[in-house]
Amino acid sequence: MNYINEPGAIVPGFLFSAKNRPLLFDRFSNEKFDLIVIGGGVTGAGIALDAQLRGIKTALFEMQDFAGGTSSRSTKLIHGGLRYLKQFEFGLVAETGRERAVIQRLAPHITHPIPMLLPIYKNGTLSKFSASLATWVYDFLARVKSTEKRKVLSLEETLQHEPLLKKEGLLGGILYYEYITDDARLTQEVIKTAFAKGALP
């Protein structure tokens, strides 16, 4: 299969491909850029895309492989909003909830809801009431879908979800949802979008 149909031409459909790297390197040498972003992680990829969409001719450089560093070693969770709530960062909880919804809408193929179980123990950090209230506020601020709203579980229901929990002092639990993603692939999707808009990675 021929990826390139004539000298110097890049075939649509195979744009973001190692097969085209020699042509892209040649463009790096012969074109002028308004902005050069160094670092092909998710931050660099996002900056490149944003700049290119604003009409700034952008090039993205990465020493090794795209998303090969920190962006491939995260928790895979998209914004752990509960920790912000614990610090009374209500605006940040709402903001991250909106951002999470955008990512899920734009990349549903690599962004999925995952249930999280918060066990509640006697004399623990949170009482069952405060944990229930906190996750309700989280659902409200983050505009969580009705099918993914938190559920307050009894002791028996909690153990059904996680039988290996320590039973002594266990009062119940809260089942809530976070979103998980393939962060390296998400970074690559952002870079491909930036490339399609004219940035040069």
Image (cartoon, grey):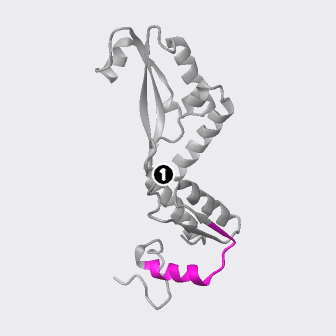
Image-based side of 73 in relation to 129, left or right: left
Q: Residue at x 59, y 24 (%)?
A: 86
Viewer-closest of 84 and 128: 84
The picture places residue 155, in percent across and down from the top left corner, at 37, 12
Q: Quadrant of the N terminus?
A: bottom left
Viewer-closest of 169 and 141: 169
Residue at the limit of the structure toward the bottom, as seen here? 7
The picture places residue 115, in percent across and down from the top left corner, at 42, 32
Residue at the limit of the structure toward the front, as seen here? 63
Q: Residue at x 47, y 28 (%)?
A: 176
Q: Secondary structure under badge 1?
A: helix
The picture places residue 25, in percent across and down from the top left corner, at 51, 79
Residue 64 drawn above or below residue 91: below
Most frequent secondary structure within the magenta stretch: helix
Q: Residues within 10 Å of mark 1 (few under 14, many from 20)?
A: many
Q: Count of labels shown? A: 1
Specify whether residue 137 is painted magenta: no
Magenta extent: 20-36
Residue type pointed to by label 1: Ser
What residue did someone put label 1 on?
A: 71
Q: Residue at x 52, y 57 (%)?
A: 41
Specify whether residue 27 is painted magenta: yes
Residue 194 drawn above or below residue 8: above
Residue 79 drawn above or below residue 105: above
Figure quadrant of residue 194: bottom right
Residue 114 drawn above or below residue 128: below
